[in-house]
Image (spheres, rainbow, N blue to C red):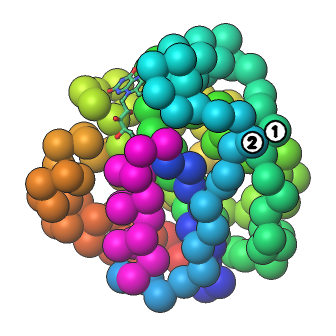
């Protein structure tokens, strides 16, 4: 199954998961790049506000053609108990081109379910699998078992 991993990462945690996933699946990968500067404390506050308000941003054009892929794995950090604004924007802009999806997120605490429900609402597609990891699990490299379980779930659904 032709698979694409697409993700946004402000501080590298979700990126680390996406890259190990790409290595495991040997598939295509693309990072969502936000044109809005989200660095520093002001960037943090604006990010939380944007996610909470469900606003959209301007993301750089995606180089891959999303509808060339049968399965797209979409990764986001949790922002304000919600999907991050750049990933919301990607879902909104590409919902017509997505076939099957799976979602993954990283977060400081918990409440991943709300984020996944929100992602599903934006693109109106139920994921075939989900993976939620804490920042701590990722930084301490304690997520390989969950990652393998997620990848196995994908192949069960294929
Ligand atoms: C604006 C903002 C809001 C956040 N809100 C939450 C939250 O509601 N719940 C949570 O568990 N973590 C929250 N976090 C923490 C991030 O989800 C977590 O650090 C994540 O792993 C960062 O991923 P990244 O390094 O890929 O950007 C928030 C982080 C930011 C920047």
Determine whether 53 is above or below 103 in the image. Answer: above
- In-front residue for pair 60/80: 60
Query: Quadrant of residue 86 in the image?
Result: top right
- In-front residue for pair 152/35: 35
Please indicate, yes or no, whether residue 124 appears anywhere in the rendered image: no
Give residue 58's mark: 1
Cβ(mark 2) to ligand 1 < 8 Å? no
Give residue 35's mark: 2
- Mark 2 neighbour density, 10 Å: few (under 14) some (14–19) many (20 or more): few
- Residue numbers of the magenta segment: 10-23
Q: Are marks 2 and 1 in contact (CB under 8 Å)?
A: yes
How many tags in the picture? 2
Residue plotted at (28% across, 31% down): 108
Image quadrant, ligand 1: top left
Quick check: 55 left or right of 29?
right
- Decide whether residue 78 is among the magenta residues: no
Quick one: SS at disc 2?
loop
- Magenta span main SS: helix
Please indicate, yes or no, whether residue 47 appears anywhere in the rendered image: yes
Quick one: SS at disc 1?
loop
Query: Quadrant of residue 119 in the image?
Result: top right
Residue plotted at (55% across, 62% down): 73
Residue plotted at (36% across, 43% down): 106
Residue plotted at (38% across, 32% down): 112
Query: Quadrant of residue 150 in the image?
Result: bottom left
Determine whether 6 is above or below 155 in the image. Answer: above
Cβ(mark 1) to ligand 1 < 8 Å? no
Quick check: 128 left or right of 36?
left
Q: Position of residue 28 (x, y in %)?
A: 60, 80
Q: Position of residue 57 (x, y in %)?
A: 77, 32
Q: Position of residue 91 (x, y in %)?
A: 73, 44
Give residue 80's mark: none
């Amino acid at each position: 199954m032709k698979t694409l991993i697409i993700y946004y990462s402000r501080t590298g945690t979700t990126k680390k998961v996406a890259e190990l996933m790409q290595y495991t699946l040997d598939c295509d990968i693309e990072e969502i790049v936000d044109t809005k500067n989200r660095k520093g404390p002001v960037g943090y506050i604006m990010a939380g506000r944007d996610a909470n308000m469900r606003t959209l941003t301007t993301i750089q054009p995606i180089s891959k053609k999303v509808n060339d892929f049968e399965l797209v794995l979409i990764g986001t950090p949790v922002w304000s108990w919600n999907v991050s604004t750049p990933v919301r924007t990607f879902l909104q802009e590409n919902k017509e081109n997505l076939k099957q999806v799976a979602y993954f997120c990283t977060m400081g605490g918990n409440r991943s379910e709300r984020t996944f429900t929100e992602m599903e609402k934006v693109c109106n597609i139920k994921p075939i699998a989900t993976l939620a990891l804490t920042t701590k699990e990722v930084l301490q490299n304690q997520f390989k078992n969950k990652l393998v379980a997620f990848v196995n779930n994908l192949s069960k659904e294929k």
